[in-house]
Amino acid sequence: MSETGYTDERSAGSDEPQDGTDLISNTLREQVNFLLAGGKIEKVSNDSELDACLTLQKRAKEALRQLEVERTEKVKPLNDHVKEINNHFKMITEPIDTVVRNCSQVGGAYQIEKKRIADEAKRIADQAAELERKRLAQLESDRIAEEERLRNEAKQAEAAGNIELANEAHAIADLVAQDAVSAAIAAQDVKPVDVARVTTPQGVKADYVYSAELTDGRAVLRWIVENSEYGYFEGAALTKVLEAGLNKIAKIRRETFLVPGARKVETPYMR
């Protein structure tokens, strides 16, 4: 019995030809050898030759039928065995193929959602940056206009001989100009105050940076005092901003300037 599952009728060391006839039965081999050696009929010239031709054809057809029977007998067990092997491996490969498809699906969904969140975060950040740029540009435009107005007011006062009013207008204009410096320093001093990790329904995690935008300065100052949150508001930037406001108060109140935590400084101002 060979590894292919059928009996090889050839004996070891046989001198039988390896032309395919060695796989068929001995009885059928005689018929096949006869047909293979018979040659080709070139022409039929009479009834006797026709009968001989038809007989040969019938014999060849029968040989083909018997060959197909023997071929099927030898091939079918092999085909059945191959089918069995394929089915066995299919039971193993199908669940593994499911793992591959599942990883592709969930992994692809994650990547798509991750990109969507990143794109949305960038869009929001770009939009916020653009709004902030416009807001700062408007503030700077307003500041320049106010400084120019005060400088013109000072020039008019000087022309009218009102030196005190001119000095006061120049001083306030200087404070307005100083506000631009303080704002620039404060902008450089701003740090992200918190980073929160957000989980989406799809299980994708994204980082968001949180900062603050001032909308009501008085309310913020009141909150700082009422909640003793001074630790978050220390540094050179805050000092500049507070001093700018205190300078305005001192300019207006002069001798009556009394603010806890600040002192009045009198500096000769020569024009």
Image (spheres, rainbow, N blue to C red):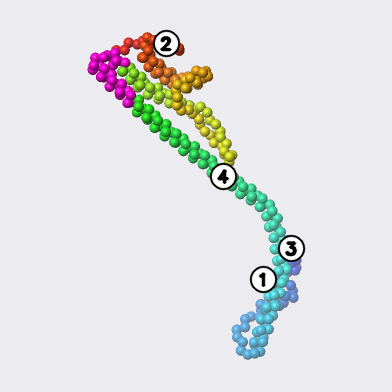
Query: Which element type, helix, strand or loop, lies under badge 3?
Result: loop
Q: Which residue is mark 3?
A: 5
Q: Residue at point 45% right, 24% down?
A: 216
> Which class describes the residues within 10 Å of circle 1: few (<14), some (14-19), or many (20+)?
few
Q: Is residue 130 magenta?
A: no
**Gap between marks 4 and 2 measured at Cα:** 65 Å
Whether residue 261 can be seen here: yes
Q: Is residue 162 magenta?
A: yes
Which of the two labelled residues, at mark 1 and mark 3, occupies the earlier sequence position?
3
240 relative to 66 in the view: left or right: left
Look at the picture and state if 199 lies above or below 53.
above
52 relative to 125 in the view: left or right: right
Query: Which element type, helix, strand or loop, lies under badge 4?
Result: helix
Q: Which residues are magenta?
A: 144-168
Query: Which element type, helix, strand or loop, lies under badge 1?
Result: loop
Q: Which mark is residue 60?
A: none
Q: Quadrant of residue 154?
A: top left
Q: Amino acid at mark 1?
A: Asp
Tell me residue 105's x, y (percent).
Answer: 59, 47
Foreground residue, 266 or 49?
A: 266
